[in-house]
Image (cartoon, rainbow, N blue to C red):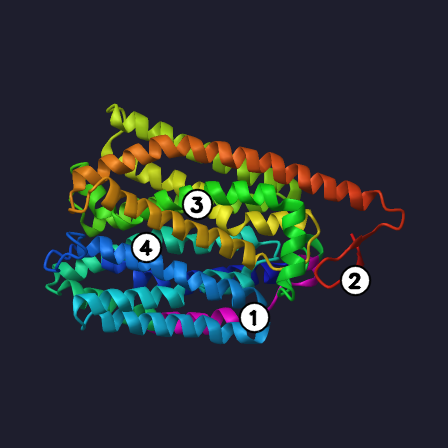
Amino acid sequence: MRPSSERWRSARLALLALAYYSCVFCIKASMFACSWTQMPTFFGGLNYKTCLALAQTFGYAAGKIPSLIYSPKLPQERLRGALIAVLVVSGSCVTLSCVTPPWVSLCLVWLACVWLAPTWSILQRFLEGRRDTERIVATVSFAYIGSAGLCKGAAVDLLALGLTDTEAVAACAIFGTVVGVAAALGVAAQPPPSAADIEKRGRRQAMTSYRDQCGHLQAHFGFGITLCVAGYTILGSLRAYRDYFQLELFQAVGLAAGSSHFAASEVTVSLFVLTATAAFGLLDDNRHALDVILRVSAASVAGLAGLTALHQSGHVAGFTWIVGVGALCFLAYVPLGTMLFDRLLGAAHEHVTSALLNLVMDASVLVGTATLLCYKDFVQQQQAEDAAHMYAFFCSACWHLGWVIAVLLLASNWSLGCAVDKRRRMAASRNTGLATDYCDGHDHKV
């Protein structure tokens, strides 16, 4: 039995990381609980709220470029400063956006998300490579499910107290910045993975040569990773659309979008996903966990399509559908984006950080989200904030794209499983019992 001190260490890290990442959503998510009806339109009729969604999406996309270059190579001693910097700069930008003209505020929101782009990859450097990584990540996942809804609900309550849209957003941003800095200091103070963690999961070292290490991963796992990234891109786009336009989805199914609905839906989703994803930590074998993550994710997105069909046929109520869509989206999204590559590297005995692979996944989602938003606004010409049209577009996307994602993930499961098995057979066939450590160029026992 593992000592209680080790379990408490993991729980402490999980709670501090949850507090930190919740503050990120306090800074960026509250603006989507506001209607912004007093704001002008842009680009021939594009409403301000859609422009905010595009500004955040393109900001994150632009920020992924330097993130891909620097985050996986950051030495351990610089991670704490990076955690604090991204939060302070982004919070300041959002706060300033509340007192500037509309076009300037959009630029500031874009800049805030440029700085927020590497946040998860930096935070994950503290979380990966542990026997409790799944449980820790499951706890942190409450931030971008439940905390996002709670932050929107808090913004709704501030609006009900008489604050304007900009005042409510500024209050949330300031609160998130102050609390987030304290949480970042706590995360950075926690001990690194233990020797037992390293024995079970492998050592997660900073990358040293993108050319050699990425080339190696591409040669052995490239096709499976590409399929997974494609499925994750579409899935992340659906999740982002639901997040950006949840207010309109509530309205379309006949519900008043008050703080209680935001909180009830997202807390329910987060508790379900937290429990389900924490269960992945019970899987001791990395190869088996790789299969389970991809198959559960594929089943979840297939269920997403089926649930939407039942809702449109009148068999599932509106609130239940919104909660169910969120639960199934995140049940696939969280393990793929946070656990899959840590398990893949562990199963294949690769001793390198998973940060770069996760950043590639995140960047692809941003491209997919931007494409989906632009398609809605410029191809479908749904530029007006019409809840009925936004709802119809989302239902159609869930039904048609859910099956596509499921096929891509199952194909990825087959490809990655074959690649890992091949690597294991190669290692087992060596008379010396040694395998090449592709991270540092030295031999080590498998």
Considering the numbered disc 4 on the image, is that residue within a helix, a strand or a loop? helix
Q: Which residue is mark 4?
A: 148
Q: Residue at x 34, y 56 (%)?
A: 57
How far apart are the two marked residues, 4 and 3, measured between alpha carbons? 20 Å
246 sits left or right of 45 in the view: right
225 sits left or right of 305 in the view: right
Crowding near the residue tagged with mark 3, few <14, some 14–19, many ≥20 C-alpha atoms within 10 Å? many
Q: Which residue is mark 1?
A: 74
How far apart are the two marked residues, 2 and 4, measured between alpha carbons? 44 Å
Q: Which residues are magenta?
A: 178-198
Crowding near the residue tagged with mark 1, few <14, some 14–19, many ≥20 C-alpha atoms within 10 Å? some
Q: Position of residue 150 (x, y in %)?
A: 29, 55
Please identify the quarter of the rendering in which residue 287 is found.
top right
Q: Which residue is mark 2?
A: 442
Disc number placed over residue 233 in the picture, else none: 3
How far apart are the two marked residues, 1 and 4, measured between alpha carbons? 28 Å
Identify which amino acid the numbered label 3 is placed on: Thr
Considering the numbered disc 1 on the image, is that residue within a helix, a strand or a loop? loop
Which numbered disc, 2 or 4, marks the residue closer to the eye?
2
- The reply to whether residue 198 is visible in this rendering is yes
Mark before the other along the chain sequence, 1 or 4: 1
How far apart are the two marked residues, 2 and 1, measured between alpha carbons? 22 Å
Q: Are marks 4 and 3 in contact (CB under 8 Å)?
A: no
Identify which amino acid the numbered label 2 is placed on: His
Residue 62 lies in magenta, yes or no? Answer: no
Mark before the other along the chain sequence, 4 or 3: 4
Crowding near the residue tagged with mark 2, few <14, some 14–19, many ≥20 C-alpha atoms within 10 Å? few
